[in-house]
Image (tube, rainbow, N blue to C red):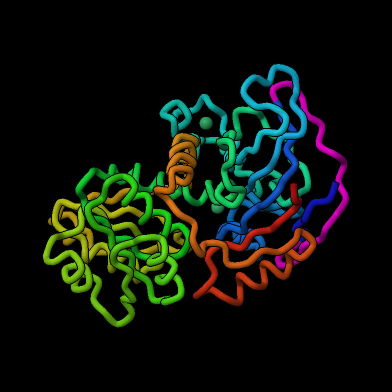
Amino acid sequence: MKAAQTIAPGKVEIRDFPMPVIGPGQILVRMLSVGICASDVQVFHGKHKYASFPLVQGHEGIGVVVDTGSGVKHVAVGDHVNIQQQFACGTCYACRKGRHNVCFSLKGIGILADGLFAEYFASPEWNVITLPEGFENDKGMLAEPASVGVNSAMVAEMRRGERAVVIGAGIIGNFTAQACLAMGAADVLIADIADAKLKIAERNGIPHCLNTGGVELADAISQAFKGEVPDVIFDCAGSPATIHAAISAAANASRVVIVANFKEAVTFEIPSFQRREIALLSVMGTVKESTLEAVDLLHGGKMRIDGIISRRYPLDKILDAYQYVDDNPSTVMKVAIDIARE
Ligand SMILES: [Zn+2]
Ligand SMILES: [Zn+2]
């Protein structure tokens, strides 16, 4: 079978690999589509702390089951599945609390173990989610980033009637804003400096989509919410400027949630933060429960994917796909690698 193997920073080759052999409890998946994630780009450029080469990248994928090992009970040949990113131990402190996304010995697929930019992938049965009958393939591929949005809203403990602000209208910001609405938020504002991304947020039903370049975030919020304060502010952009904006715009007794992956250290005024009793929370990717919820919300139309896929490339053009992502930071949402058709 063919797979795209990153052999050095910025270098990827389509190579022949032996067909994966499945053992008991495992399934063989023929990959259909796999998305390129911001973390894939980081790995690709050799800027990810833990990844090393050679590596088959990719962790946001949908495929169809073509074989099952002995003892597989809940997945059958022909099922469409979304593959979960993390191989977790299942027994450590974090796993016992249901937070396998921060397992003490976590192995992220496509980062610490070979991933999904391949024609076939062998997975333990427990690591996949069976998608409902008739579920759109693109939604199946996007279930992972959508679930990061759901997981962010879950970690924030969004309650019905609350107001949320999301900084960053990229794919994770977009899905976080949609998840808040789906979970009953009374009002949501999404802020960015890229108009193209704000337009896509608008198409997906976010009530306030604001270009906050040159505007104080707190002023923009107060105008949009007619003087009401936000209960939660999510930082889905991940820069010193955005977390500072989030903290200074946060109301006394409210929550700030770090969703984006920060690449550098940030310092901020603890006294002003503490005096206002702001809760600072953080999210690292997603958990299976949030993916199941995201699949439900996508299936029921409560989360949408209008304009989310910016471009598609076949597997052998994956280098062009990475180039396209690099060249278009202010417009690109998700780039899909189409591996096989049904
Ligand atoms: Zn991802
Ligand atoms: Zn664990």
Q: How many marks?
A: 0
329 vs 69, left or right, is: left
Locate residue 158, reporting x and y percent: 27, 45
Which image quadrant is residue 237 in? bottom left
Pick the front one: 24 or 228:
228
Q: Residue at x 67, y 62 (%)?
A: 44
Q: Residue at x 61, y 63 (%)?
A: 335
Q: Is residue 17 visible?
A: yes
Q: Residue at x 25, y 54 (%)?
A: 232
Residue extending farthest to the bottom is: 214
Residue extending farthest to the top is: 71
116 up-or-down from 19: above or below: below
Q: Is residue 102 visible?
A: no
Which image quadrant is residue 322 in? bottom right
Q: Is residue 21 magenta?
A: yes
Please report the bounds of the magenta region as a residue range.
Answer: 8-25
**Magenta stretch: helix, strand or loop mostly:** loop
Pick the front one: 180 or 287:
180
Locate residue 202, reporting x and y percent: 38, 67
241 vs 60, left or right, is: left
Pick the front one: 135 or 233:
135
202 up-or-down from 142: above or below: below
Q: Is residue 48 magenta?
A: no
Q: Residue at x 26, y 56 (%)?
A: 164
Locate residue 263, reporting x and y percent: 48, 62
